[in-house]
Amino acid sequence: MEIPIEELGHPGWLTELHVVPQFAGQVSDDRAALTDRTPRAFEVAALLSKAPVAKSTVNFQFTAEDGSSYFLVPADAMDVATPWGGVRVEKNKAGEASLVRMTCTATSANEALATLHLACAAFLDHMSFAANAPVYIVEMRAGDPRHKMEMVRFASPFRLSTINPVMMSMPLPLRPMFALYREALNSASPLYRFLCLYKILEGYFERLKPALHKVFRDAGRDYPVPRELVPDDKDLLPELKAHVGTSMSKFRDDHLTPNYRTAVAHFEKDGDTPLISSDPDQLARFNHTGLAVELCARTVIESYQRAFQAALDAGFDLSALA
């Protein structure tokens, strides 16, 4: 089965594929299976890796040989008890913990994967500290025996892009922005990616744009770029679609800062419960919102490039901006 890469979600962010089998002579409603919320058993698995893996294909049948880690398992496998249920850690031929399996009761594939993620975090966070080594969950799978369905969760692959030589030049004030953007794309953590992208908005609205705006104002010219608005994208969730077309600076101040930035930048603030960065609910929140922030970050960088070029074309002295 081949799926166009454009249909696998926004590059770099978590996405899901559900497969519902069709059998000869079968008359059934796929939606009924997908929306079944009765408790039932799920077979779930998480693939481990020593580093984030750039995937161009999706493997529903990944095994222990597809994974890796810096954790050596002395026995054939290791059973771990967690508050969310027992898991079995399998190893590859090199003896490295590479796959985590679990059977759990849930009402949906997403709920089953959330249970597995909580169970994995319960011991992987501690093992990472004990071994002083990173470990990544690069793919997750949920099998629903009742409906013979499978769901896989993974980071949508990045696309190939032809480099334009014109792209090699950039306004020097944007150097920190491009560095933050690349750092965001390189990160496998939705929370850290969000923070990098948020800092781009912070730097643009609090420093870069005001300084460039002053250049135009001092020259008696209008700023050449319209006010930045939250852009749209087909992969935005409905609750984020509500912000599309609104002021981007207001979106940052009224929504991103109190609901996300404060939590990720402080261990604990005003008595709030500390954010657990491996919690699946938090990962989902920052994954969904992070896409909107990425779109905003790209928009402000492109806006600055246009305004900076307009200033160059007008012959303005921009030395104070470097």
Image (cartoon, rainbow, N blue to C red):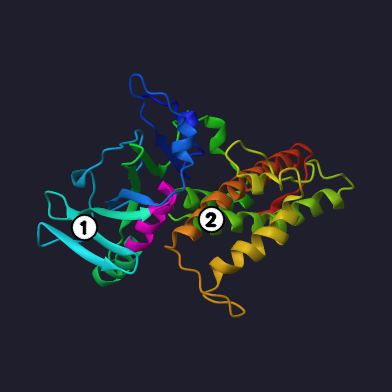
Which segment did they paint magenta?
106-119
Q: In the image, is residue 98 above or below residue 122?
A: above
State the image coordinates of residue 120 (x, y, percent, origin top left): 32, 61
**Comparing marks 2 and 1, which lies closer to the viewer?**
1
Q: What amino acid does circle 2 point to?
A: Phe
At a point 52% along the width and 29% down the height, the residue shown is 164
Q: Report the Cα–Cα distance between label 2 and label 1.
A: 28 Å
Q: Is residue 197 left or right of residue 258?
A: left
State the image coordinates of residue 109 (x, y, percent, origin top left): 41, 47
- Earlier-in-chain disc, 2 versus 1: 1
Would you name the residue on which mark 2 appears?
286
Q: Is residue 190 left or right of residue 77?
A: right
The answer to whether residue 85 of the structure is visible from this angle is yes
At a point 17% along the width and 55% down the height, the residue shown is 96
Mark 2 residue crowding within 10 angstroms, few (<14) / some (14–19) / many (20+): many
The secondary structure type at the circle numbered 2 is: helix
* The C terminus, quarter of image: bottom right
User: Which residue appears farthest toward the top when viewing the image?
Assistant: 25
At a point 36% along the width and 38% down the height, the residue shown is 147
Main SS category, magenta section: helix
* The N terminus, quarter of image: top left
Would you name the residue on which mark 1 appears?
89
Q: Is residue 41 left or right of residue 165?
A: left
Residue 214 appears in which quarter of the rendering? bottom right
State the image coordinates of residue 158 (x, y, percent, origin top left): 44, 37
Q: What amino acid does circle 1 point to?
A: Val
Q: Mark 2 touching mark 1, by CB under 8 A?
A: no
